[in-house]
């Protein structure tokens, strides 16, 4: 081989190495999250955003129990319109997934597009720049959910902060029948005409709504959170009297404490309160609107993601609502059954005493006696693993049949924002640690 041929061969080898190196670089660069997941980022924006999740633990960051079907939606549902639900996270993570429910639907729910994003500001429908992600379901951008069923999305790569507003948007092109919803959101969400799931500006979302529709859960993949505490309750847990859009339910304050306090378990908090909920009695309909605590417990509590502990705060509506439950033992036995079901999963249960309602329009001495009877048994330690005494924390020291004035929203049943804070501050966070106690 001549010297000239040797130089030529060497140059060819170097050229091949450069080409291979460039290919490797492009392949590595192509795995960058920001280009793969962001909608509208050139050709990569059309790709499936549900990339394989990195390591971590799936935990619940937000949830709301399906409570019934929305009046007036029985024929068309929200055909041809986009629903942008606004929800508030309790913990953050590196990926997110959602659950959509058609529990109260009578026909299949067709969702052809869905997205998730961070909100640009509190109580607003606009998207924070660079955070809009297209959601998929088993790799498809559309999903059909049969009546009575639910569907979980694939994981979408999105860095979700704690204590932040998320926008979850769905579009259904065809009539779906009754819309499954949660009526007392204490949060404004939005509706737009047409398919606006990937609209970042939010200008089209001209209709406001106090409901959450279809959406029942948001989970996050976290390296900092170990599990989920599920809070199971009625309108007091639902936060019906808290300030709209301010996230001042007692469960919101509990989530703040779990994040901030040294030694606290690192749990997400999901709120499974339904206003008017009772332990023993279902509402009307099939499936029942506002189903009893006993009938919905497996789905709404034990079926949640990453559950480590359960908090139960139910009973006042069994006493107050017609037909009144005048037997404290029956209410307590219902609570014990919830504890037994939780123990079958090896989970710990913290139960709350029933708070006073003196001065409420439904108050009566006989009902007060039932409340006292229920609380006496709860405090005995034979109903739950641990007790949080909301009654003692919020009652008027001069008239224990009533809420303290500054903790009363004004209806003598539901707490004020200050009352909700007092509830969360009364909670001993150490009670959430460990597994189930001995059989009660």
Image (cartoon, rainbow, N blue to C red):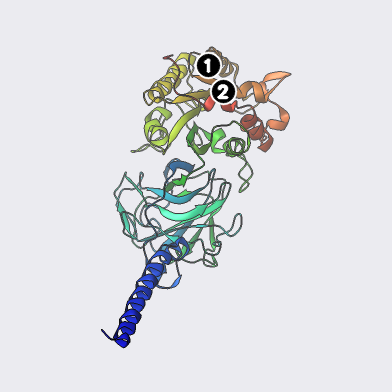
Quadrant where the C terminus sits is top left
* Pointer 2 local density, CA inside 10 Å: few below 14, some 14–19, many at least 20: many
Taking 382 as reference, is 97 above or below it? below
The answer to whether one can see residue 64 in this image is no
Task: Single out the mark in the foreground, 2 or 1.
Answer: 1
Q: Residue at x 43, y 19 (%)?
A: 336
Q: Which residue is mark 1?
A: 378
Horizontal and vertical percent position of residue 187: 56, 49
Residue 420, labelled with which disc? none
Is the residue 154 above or below the residue 336 in the image? below
What residue do we see at 46% from left, 70% from top?
41
> Residue 167: percent from the left, percent from the top?
50, 56
Dot 1 alpha-carbon crowd within 10 angstroms: few under 14, some 14 to 19, many 20 or more: many
- Position of residue 303 measured from the top left corner of the image (x, y, whole percent): 38, 36
Relative to 223, does residue 278 appear above or below in the rendering? above
- Residue closest to the far left: 1
Secondary structure at numbered mark 1: helix
Is residue 35 placed above or below 189 in the rendered structure? below
Residue bearing mark 2: 354
- Asked whether the beta carbons under mark 2 and mark 1 sit within 8 Å of each other, the answer is yes
- Seen at 54% across and 13% down, the residue is 373
Residue 208 placement (x, y as % from top left): 54, 57
């Amino acid at each position: 081989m001549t010297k000239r041929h040797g130089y030529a061969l060497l140059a060819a080898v170097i050229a091949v190495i450069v080409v291979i190196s460039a290919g490797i670089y492009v392949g590595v660069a192509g795995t960058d999250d920001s280009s793969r997941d962001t909608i509208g980022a050139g050709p990569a924006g059309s790709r499936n955003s549900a990339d394989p999740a990195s390591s971590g633990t799936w935990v619940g960051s937000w949830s709301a129990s399906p409570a019934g079907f929305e009046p007036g939606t029985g024929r068309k549902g929200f055909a041809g319109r986009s629903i942008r639900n606004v929800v508030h996270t309790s913990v953050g993570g590196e990926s997110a997934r959602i659950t959509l429910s058609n529990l109260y639907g009578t026909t299949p729910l067709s969702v052809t597009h869905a997205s998730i994003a961070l909100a640009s500001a509190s109580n607003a429908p606009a998207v924070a720049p660079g955070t809009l992600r297209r959601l998929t379901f088993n790799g498809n951008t559309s999903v059909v959910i049969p009546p009575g069923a639910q569907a979980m999305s694939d994981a979408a790569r999105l860095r979700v902060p704690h204590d932040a507003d998320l926008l979850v948007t769905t579009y259904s092109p065809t009539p779906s029948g009754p819309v499954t919803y949660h009526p007392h959101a204490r949060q404004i969400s939005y509706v737009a005409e047409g398919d606006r799931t990937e609209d970042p500006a939010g200008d089209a979302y001209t209709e406001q709504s106090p409901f959450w529709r279809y959406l029942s859960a948001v989970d996050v993949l976290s390296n900092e959170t170990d599990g989920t505490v599920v809070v199971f309750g009625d309108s007091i847990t639902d936060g019906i009297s808290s300030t709209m859009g301010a996230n001042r339910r007692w469960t919101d304050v509990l989530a703040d404490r779990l994040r901030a306090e040294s030694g606290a378990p690192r749990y997400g908090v999901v709120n499974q309160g339904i206003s008017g909920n009772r332990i023993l009695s279902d509402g009307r309909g099939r499936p029942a609107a506002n189903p009893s605590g006993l009938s919905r417990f497996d789905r709404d509590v034990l079926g949640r993601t990453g559950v480590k502990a359960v908090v139960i705060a139910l009973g006042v509506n069994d006493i107050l609502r017609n037909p009144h439950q005048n037997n404290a033992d029956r209410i307590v036995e219902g609570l014990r059954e919830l504890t037994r079901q939780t123990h079958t999963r090896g989970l710990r249960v913290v139960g709350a005493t029933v708070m006073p309602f003196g001065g409420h329009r439904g108050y009566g001495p006989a009902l007060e006696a039932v409340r006292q009877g229920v609380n006496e048994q709860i405090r005995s330690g034979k109903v739950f693993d641990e007790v949080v005494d909301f009654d003692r924390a919020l009652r008027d020291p001069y008239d224990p049949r009533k809420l303290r004035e500054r903790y009363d929203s004004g209806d003598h049943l539901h707490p004020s924002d200050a009352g909700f804070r007092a509830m969360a501050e009364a909670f001993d966070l150490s009670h959430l640690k460990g597994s189930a106690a001995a059989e009660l």
